[in-house]
Image (spheres, coloured by chain):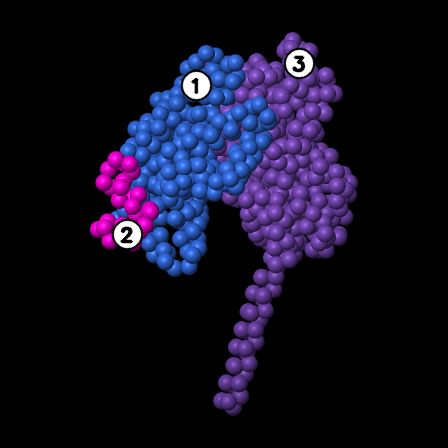
Chain colours: A blue, B purple
Amino acid sequence: MSNFLQVLIDGILSGLLYALVAAGLSMMWGVMDVINFAHGEFLMVAMYLCYWIGEILGIDPLFSWIAGGIFLFLMGALTYRLIIKNSLGKAAMAPLLATFGLSMLLKNFCMNRFTPNFRLLSGTIMEGKTFEVAGAIVSLPQLVTAIFSLVVLLGVYWLIKKTRVGWAIQATAMDKEAAELMGIDTENIYLLVFGIGGACVGVAGGLMTTYLAVHPEVGGLFSLIAFVVVALGGFGSIPGALFAALLIGLVESFAGFYVAAVVKYVAVFAIYLVVILIRPKGLFGW
Amino acid sequence: MQLRKRSMFAVLMVLVFSMMVCSSAFAADKVIKIGALFPLTGPAAVSGQNCVNAVLAAADVINKANPDINAPLAAKEGLLDGYKIEIIKADHQGKPDVAKSEAERLYNQEKVFAVIGCYNSSATKPASAVAERAKKIFMCGCSSSAALTERDYKYFFRHAPTDAIESKEFVDYIEYLNKEKKAGIKTLGVIYENTEFGKHAAEEAHKAAKAIGLKVVADVPFNNGATNLNSEVQTLKAANPDAVFGAALGGDYSLWVRTMKQVNWLPKIALNYCTGYQNPAVQKELAGDGDHFMGGMGYSPALAKEFMPEAIKIEKKYYTPRSNQPFDSDSIQEGVMLFVLAQAIEKAGSLDTEKVVQLLRTEEFPSVMSLSGKVKFEPGGQNVYALSVITQIKDQDYKTVFPLKYKKSEPVFPMTPWDKR
């Protein structure tokens, strides 16, 4: 029973983290129909930023995630202004290839500046802290990350559903020309969406430095899973991203323990394929 | 007369200029290109960069006059009649298909004389197959999959002990602990990356365990570069083996250790193949969490102090300035392979591949950077003097605990539980 509970808790905690990483991507993809191939590298940049803030200034990731969120908001907005905006309306693959180029640039820049060494923050407030629930061990850093994920996701959901800016985002996603005719500045909306997308992944990356090593390749598998979460949950849907991420976390965890550890990602991608075949728009697609 | 003088001057200038061009052309020709094919990006990039740095350090020892280093080819500059080694770096990203195409590029376009590589056994396998087809030399330092030297290749040579040798050493140590320390180690768990290296290591672990009646209660492969190892460690914890053999590279190794801490579980003893365990940079990041884990090593600063003093000189002069750390057990072996190749070329007196290969197959070479002090290859290319010892990490320091001949420290056994550290 404690094994079952442990696997369940691990699955939920992983799922909530995936949801936060994927939320930003979901918005960019859903609103602008732009695939940001540099999403994993955004995560890596946030992790490096919070790692160095912790290492040099001694500020714990429990607080430095704010810097991660702000920096990645600006980075997302800048990416839109300097790269995406200039590639939209050109060749169909231009934005995709541009973000791919950006991902290579960021990865190789970090490789060059920080070497491929794995960097792990030690002496953080939550380091190694755990507690037991009915025989299952819960990692405090992962739990806190998961709680932050939920809060940020709820915040983004509220922003989209309950505010005028959110309605403008939805309108832009549905019909850009009509939104412009209604007086919505779609350029600013795009900028904001890229910024919010970056901020989500920035917060995730900042918090992850409490328990994961930072290195130039760290974003790789996270971004792949984020793509699956977005496609599974439905482009642009925050509840969809949350549901899909939890599903993926649980499938990964249960398949990994009860079937074989090596098949955990096979199970994730198999479910993704099945859902996409049955419902190409994803579970909660706009 | 004036015209004749001018003509003669012009002819002289042309001659001098021609000689300058020719001599620089000859000088340019006196280069032996050697490919260094390693994972310079990707999950094993840290180790790959260290391997390249070790090869570059060895090249510096050969190319420059180093009378302070007592090693073959160190005292004079270059090889043969003034040839210099030029290292051509290539990155296979830890991917077998990239390793194959990069090996083809190195041999066919860069015209390298030999390739040294590839760290990952999964990359070494296809890259060395390219070399074998092209009848070119492939020198492998630390890839440990036993299968590599079971192919009966003619142009492939490997320095490192295989997983089979390390597995045997691990179970020998377990037998010793059971007999002398009443350790009561009866069950084994194996956790390994799902690659050529990991699968072969696990296969050899199973064979070695069977040989001493150790029951394998958990066999846990995982995908390298995973986002988490929760299920993997949970599987180990549920089976609760007395001993665990691990084959996890770089970041996966630190994730494995941290996840075990998170679930508050440890076996009595954890022994690692050539993995992240051997990388001082990984241990530095793990700090105290890395303590009491064990693994096979062909090099540690403490071992070098006693058995490889010249290696320390090379390390200080040419390696540490590049890598900011001492040699590690993997990287040093790649440097050794360049030294061995250079000695074979020098002995052959030419760059005739067949002559050099013949010498590599038959001769014994002194090696100041090998624990055994010498290298000799058997048919198939395995170094018959391959040697590793079992070390344990204490305060980020590798302490030799087995074989008894090399023992420098009493092992901490069983491993101290996380909540008592």
* Chain letter for mark 3: B
Tell me the quarter of the picture where residue A88 sits.
bottom left
Q: Tally the numbered discs.
A: 3
Q: Nearer the viewer, residue B12 or A157?
A: A157
Mark 3 sits on what residue? B186
Looking at the image, which residue is at 65% across and 16% down? B187
Instruction: Count neighbours of disc 3 (C-alpha within 10 A) and say few if under 14, some if 14 to 19, many if 20 or more.
Output: some
* Chain letter for mark 2: A
Q: Nearer the viewer, residue B286 or B362?
A: B286
Same-chain status of marks 1 and 2: yes
Is residue B128 at least partly visible in the picture?
Answer: yes
The three-letter amino acid code for the residue at tag 3 is: Lys
Q: Can you give x and y, in whole percent of width and height, for residue B122 in the image?
A: 63, 40
Mark in front: 3 vs 2 = 2
* Chain letter for mark 1: A
Tell me the quarter of the picture where residue B210 sits.
top right
Task: Report if residue A165 lies within the magenta region.
Answer: yes
> Which label sits on residue B132?
none
Q: Nearer the viewer, residue A127 or B377?
A: A127
> Which label sits on residue A138?
1
Left or right: residue A221 versus residue B390 is left
